[in-house]
Image (tube, helix red, strand yellow):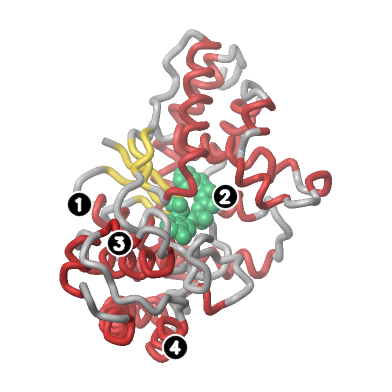
Amino acid sequence: MRVVSGIQPTGNLHLGNYLGAIKNWVKMQEEAECLFFLADLHAITVANDPAKLSANTREMAAALIASGIDPEKSTLFNQARVGGHAELAWMLFCSTPLGWLDRMTQFKEKSGKHKQRASMGLYSYPVLQAADVLIYQATHVPVGDDQKQHLELARDIASKFNSDTGQEVFTLPEALIHGPAARVMSLRDGTVKMSKSDPSDLSRINLSDSDGEIAKKIKKARTDADPLPSELAGLEGRNEARNLINIYAAIADEEPQTILSQYAGQGFGSFKPALIELMVATLSPIREKFITLKSDHNALDQLLQKGADKAAKQASSTVDSAYNALGLLRNS
Ligand code: TYM
């Protein structure tokens, strides 16, 4: 079992990233060989501020370590330090049909009405993502629900390359998407996912939020006037209520049904303070650690370089096999 996953170093780590992906990464470190990376090459597919990107990359590394990723157990690095990702992406671009990329919903969302102005990088983003996991022969890729389509594409790209070349160059990776937090929704609107790009900061909990900010955001989180039901079916059509229950369950490592059994019949006036208490108890130690780690640039740079050196060694045999399979001559 080899686990590979990544996160874009754009802005803050939020509760959706933490519960949907990072918390699972931390658990998997104990069970499998893991490689986790900061997808800085993906971050430049949209307007880029170079100074901010460097700062965000280091900060995201600090956030992952503060959340429990142990660089001694897992290989932690930023994509740009391992040239093989971009090299392999080029080889995959050449065998991926345009029609497959036309189906990608994330490109449609991100490019909006201005498709003609979007970069080729944004359009081909999922092919680089495929390279990210195929290069390490990943068997499992723990992600949130929004990455499902990209992971399905990665499998298709791997199969096509293997069959086009007649060689088993790539392992087909499996997406791991599970738990009540696979899709954490906005605190302001239970029909859209919590995201870094939402203009309202009240829509998300950031890892850097103070205890007071967490409390304020949960108090202001949209809910409804009904008491909590005793069964999951009672949350049907109550998106905001379901989201808060899922968040509670994910933090507490419980099933949503267990939480409902505990709070059935109670209103948000009593559920919200309990959620705030649990959230603050979980996030404040992470925040404190994050604040200490993020200012030590040298330590973070060294650590990312060490991770990248290790990752590059693992990547090189797949890159070599891909060049060979295509008949590209090198290393003679
Ligand atoms: P990114 O940076 O948007 O998000 C990182 C991880 O957090 C998950 N996530 C969520 N999970 C639950 N609820 C939410 N509201 C929520 N928002 C984000 C994402 O599903 C993801 O697992 N394209 C990727 C980065 C990437 C990658 C890869 C991932 C690049 N290469 C290879 C896996 C494998 C992205 O933009 O994730």
Q: Nearer the viewer, mark 2 or mark 4?
A: 4
Q: Which residue is mark 3?
A: 234
Residue of label 2: 80
The answer to whether residue 308 is seen in the rendering is no
Q: Indicate the amino acid at tag 3.
A: Gly
Amino acid type, callout 2: Ala
Outermost residue to the top: 166
x 29%, y 79%: residue? 275
Mark 3 or mark 1, which has the lower sequence index?
1
Q: What residue did someone put label 1 on?
A: 30
Q: Earlier in the sequence, mark 2 or mark 4?
A: 2
Q: Earlier in the sequence, mark 4 or mark 3?
A: 4
Closer-to-camera residue (85/122):
122
**Which is nearer the N-term, disc 2 or disc 3?**
2
330 relative to 61, above or below: above
Depth order, front residue of 226/296: 226
Q: Amino acid at mark 1?
A: Glu
Label 2 Cα crowd, 10 Å radius (few <14 / some 14-19 / many 20+):
some
Q: Where residue 245 appears, x then y in whole percent?
A: 31, 68
- In percent of width and height, residue 240 lies at 43, 68
Mark 2–mark 1 CB contact (< 8 Å): no
Query: Mark 1 near mark 4, Cβ–Cβ under 8 Å?
Result: no
Q: Secondary structure at mark 3?
A: helix
**Front residue of this view, candidates 153 and 31:** 153
Q: Which label lies toward us, 3 or 1?
A: 3
Q: CA distance from mark 2 to mark 1?
A: 27 Å
Q: Quadrant of the C terminus?
A: top right
Residue mark closest to the camera, 2 vs 3: 3
For the residues bearing labels 2 and 4, Cβ distance under 8 angstroms: no
- Figure check: 271 above or below 81: below
